[in-house]
Amino acid sequence: MSKTGNITFTIIKPGAVSNEHIGDILQKVTNAGFWIAAMKYIKLSNKQAEEFYRVHSERPFYNDLVKFMTSGPIVVAVLEKDNAVDDYRKLIGATDPSKAEEGTIRKLFAESIERNAVHGSDSNDNAIIESNFFFSRSERFTKDGDFLTFSPCGC
Ligand code: ATP
Ligand code: MG
């Protein structure tokens, strides 16, 4: 049986991982009502990081960003909750931690605008694209233990 749901995709970035904040961040995520539908601990290849951040390839920080994102292990995860994309971006706070609200994940755990602790999808479409980039359907689950199928693509 499958279930549709509102999902977002997140990365706990190098920096937050090496500073041992995985547990603190996941605690905030689950306390905020997100279900961890999929999760793994990986290290990105250059090719994967370049592809994931292709939308930023013309930005001046692109090469440094790819270097940073391949510098150590990361946690990738699919999170399920009503209104997941917007609620997660509120929970993580502004890209630049100096502008992030008190109590947000980036305010608490980011080191700089580049080393900003976590990624969160910016739209429902990108949440599905990014989740499919890292997980197959057999690797993501509903709270009831069924395989999670994304809506509206049915993928
Ligand atoms: P993310 O996509 O990681 O959730 P975001 O949507 O808040 O972050 P984007 O504009 O998509 O921000 O930038 C992607 C990532 O590029 C940022 O999270 C950050 O790591 C890096 N970045 C963005 N702006 C800068 C900058 N001015 N200098 C250095 N790195 C930057
Ligand atoms: Mg972004």
Image (cartoon, rainbow, N blue to C red):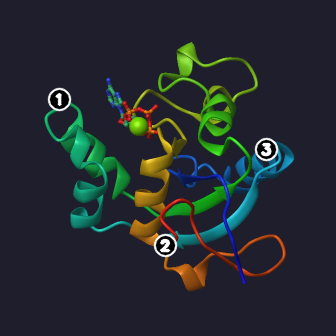
Q: Residue at x 67, y 17 (%)?
A: 101
> Which mark, by number, is residue 155?
2
Left or right: 114 in relation to 58: right
Image x and y of residue 17, in percent: 57, 54
Circle 1 residues within 10 Å: few <14, some 14–19, many ≥20: few
Do the residues under discs 3 and 1 have CB atoms within 8 angstroms?
no
Image x and y of residue 5, in percent: 68, 58
CB of residue at label 1: within 8 Å of ligand 1? yes
Image x and y of residue 4, in percent: 66, 64
* Mark 1 lies on residue: 60
Foreground pick, 134 / 4:
4
Circle 3 residues within 10 Å: few <14, some 14–19, many ≥20: some
State the CA–CA distance, disc 2 to disc 1: 34 Å
Q: Earlier in the sequence, mark 2 or mark 1?
A: 1
Q: Residue at x 65, y 52 (%)?
A: 6
* Amino acid type, residue under disc 3 in the picture: Lys
| Picture quadrant of residue 107 | top right
Q: Secondary structure at mark 3?
A: helix
Q: Residue at x 43, y 58 (%)?
A: 130
> Which mark, by number, is residue 28?
3
Image x and y of residue 136, in percent: 49, 79
CB of residue at label 3: within 8 Å of ligand 1? no
* Amino acid type, residue under disc 2 in the picture: Cys
